[in-house]
């Protein structure tokens, strides 16, 4: 027998085939991850000066290296 046939038979016998995950189960997690991403991009890219939520440069200094890594100008 060919190798792929043996693998398919052994997986089928054990019930090892993957079942697709419905989009309605993935969508809330995708939206949550997208919102976290946007929040992180805000703090890395915009949190400074007139647009700042927090006073001082604490957040800017905390994410300073990430700003350079992602190409945001800061000085």
Image (cartoon, rainbow, N blue to C red):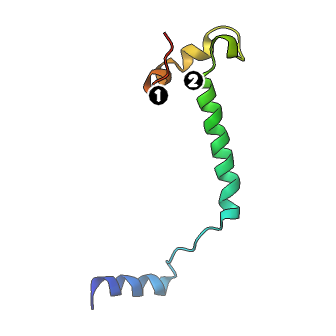
Q: Position of residue 33 (x, y in %)?
A: 63, 45
As rendered, which of 25 and 6 lies closer to the eye?
25
Q: Position of residue 37 (x, y in %)?
A: 61, 38
Above or below: residue 22 compared with residue 41: below
Estimate the x, y position of residue 52 in percent, counting from the top left.
Answer: 69, 15
Q: Secondary structure at mark 2?
A: helix
Seen at 45% across and 21% down, the residue is: 68
> Which residue occupies 49% across, 77% down?
16
* Gap in angstroms between the C-alphas marked 2 and 1: 9 Å
User: Based on the displayed image, in which of its 4 quarters is residue 43 positioned?
Assistant: top right
Does residue 49 appear left or right of residue 11 in this picture?
right
65 lies above or below 22: above
Residue at 36%, 82% (x, y): give it.
7
Q: Nearer the viewer, residue 25 or 49?
A: 49
Q: Where residue 23 sits: x, y (%)?
A: 66, 64
Q: Secondary structure at mark 1?
A: helix
Judged from this view, the residue extending furthest toward the bottom is 1
State how many labels appear.
Answer: 2
Mark 2 or mark 1: whose residue is earlier in sequence: 2
Label 2 belongs to which residue? 45
Q: Nearer the viewer, residue 70 or 6?
A: 70
Question: Which of the image's four quarters has the N terminus?
Answer: bottom left
Mark 2 touches mark 1? (CB < 8 Å): yes
Looking at this view, name the residue that lies furthest to the left: 2
In the rendered view, does 13 fall on the left or right side of 31?
Answer: left
Crowding at dot 2, Cα within 10 Å, few <14 / some 14-19 / many 20+, comes out as many
Look at 43% across and 26% down and name the residue there. Answer: 69
Q: Which residue is mark 1?
A: 70
| Occupied quadrant, residue 50 | top right
Circle 1 crowding by C-alpha within 10 Å: few under 14, some 14–19, many from 20: few
Residue 16 vs residue 30: left or right? left
- On the image, which quarter does residue 58 sit in? top right
């Amino acid at each position: 027998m060919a190798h792929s046939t043996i693998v398919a038979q052994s997986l089928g016998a054990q019930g090892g085939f993957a079942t697709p995950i419905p989009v309605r189960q993935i969508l809330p997690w995708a939206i949550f991850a997208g919102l976290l991403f946007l929040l992180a991009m805000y703090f890395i890219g915009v949190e400074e000066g007139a647009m700042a939520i927090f006073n001082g440069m604490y957040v800017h200094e905390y994410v300073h290296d990430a700003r350079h890594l992602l190409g945001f100008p800061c000085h």
